[in-house]
Amino acid sequence: METLDGEFEFVFVDDGSTDRTSAVLDELADCDERVIVVRLQRNYGKTEALVAGFEHAEGEYIVAMDGDLQHDPAEIPLLIEKLHQGYDMVCGCRVARPGDSMFTKQLPSRIANALMAKLSGVNIRDFGGGFKAFRSDLIKQIPLYGELQRFIPALASAYGARICEVPIHISERKFGKSHYGIGRLIPVLFDLITVPFLLRYMSRPMHVFGGLGLIGVFISFVLATWLMIEKVIFRVSLMANHGPLLIFAGILLLSGLILICQGLIGEMLLRKFHEQQYPQRESHALRVVTRYKNR
């Protein structure tokens, strides 16, 4: 880091470790004032650890690295150079993954990355890698929770971020064992559904819930019309001849109305959120006008 221009700091996040990590970090902090230790009370997971690090970082650029020594710090200048070129986020793309099984790790990862690139429209090959660089003002405004750290590029794209990736080399893991394997595939699949939904419909929930609800109401109306014709004109006993269909039409109508109501509730919550944010937007607009006048 000392070969780069400008000041820097190290933010180490101790995510509830049970070994000597805490003591070693305290020793580092005592020796170097550029070392900042963020200690979490228990193990919250990678996403919460990243958020804690982002909140305590004060630099213009933030570089995130895993703590398993597989990322080479010598490649940090490659990421910083891309930020200097105008990109808002730079992702390290793992060109080789020594020690990772092809069928339990690499193949599921490639499938998930391909699906995420297709669904989000972000043309990168490695979403899940932990070696990334960001502009501080970008990453601090992206809400992260659960396991969304894998999808930071997709979420950043919704904020208009310019994203690129650079090839990086991964060292073979020497200590500990990875917690990522085939068992994490199901949560990833759920996130693959959640993230595109957030990207497309977070600001317009009525479009998805209301649309599905109207489809259900329309189909139930068609079925009800046909059943009424059968009853009135042809004198058919509906329960005897079309009982299951009659019940299905009623359930479909009720489900459609519930979805429409959910869409309305979502719109009201969204409106309330924007009303709370309006004073901040107004003050931000005043600051922009003031800066423009000062120029």
Image (spheres, helix red, strand yellow):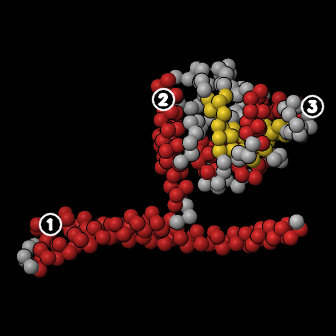
Three-letter code, disc 2: Leu
Q: CA distance from mark 1 to mark 3?
A: 81 Å
Three-letter code, disc 1: His
Q: Please report whichever mark, 1 or 2, sits nearer to the chain's N-terminal start.
A: 2
| Closer to viewer: mark 1 or mark 2 | 2
Question: Where is mark 2, residue-wise?
Answer: 107
Classify 10 Å Cα crowding around label 1: few (below 14), some (14-19), many (20 and above): some
**Circle 3/circle 2 CB separation < 8 Å:** no
Classify 10 Å Cα crowding around label 2: few (below 14), some (14-19), many (20 and above): some
| Closer to viewer: mark 3 or mark 2 | 2
Q: Quadrant of residue 49?
A: top right
Q: Position of residue 204 (x, y in %)?
A: 52, 66
Q: CA distance from mark 3 to mark 2?
A: 43 Å
Question: Where is mark 1, residue-wise?
Answer: 242
Mark 1 falls on what kind of element? helix
Answer with left or right where residue 212 lies relative to residue 98.
left
Which residue is painted at 81% across and 70% down in the image? 289
**Quadrant of the image containing the C terminus:** bottom right
Question: Where is mark 3, residue-wise?
Answer: 31
Task: In this rendered view, identify the residue nearer to me: 18 or 294.
Answer: 294
Asked if residue 117 can be seen in this view, the reply is: yes
Q: CA distance from mark 1 to mark 2?
A: 49 Å
**Circle 1/circle 2 CB separation < 8 Å:** no
Which residue is painted at 73% across and 69% down in the image? 281
Mark 2 falls on what kind of element? helix
Q: Is residue 161 above or below residue 167?
A: below
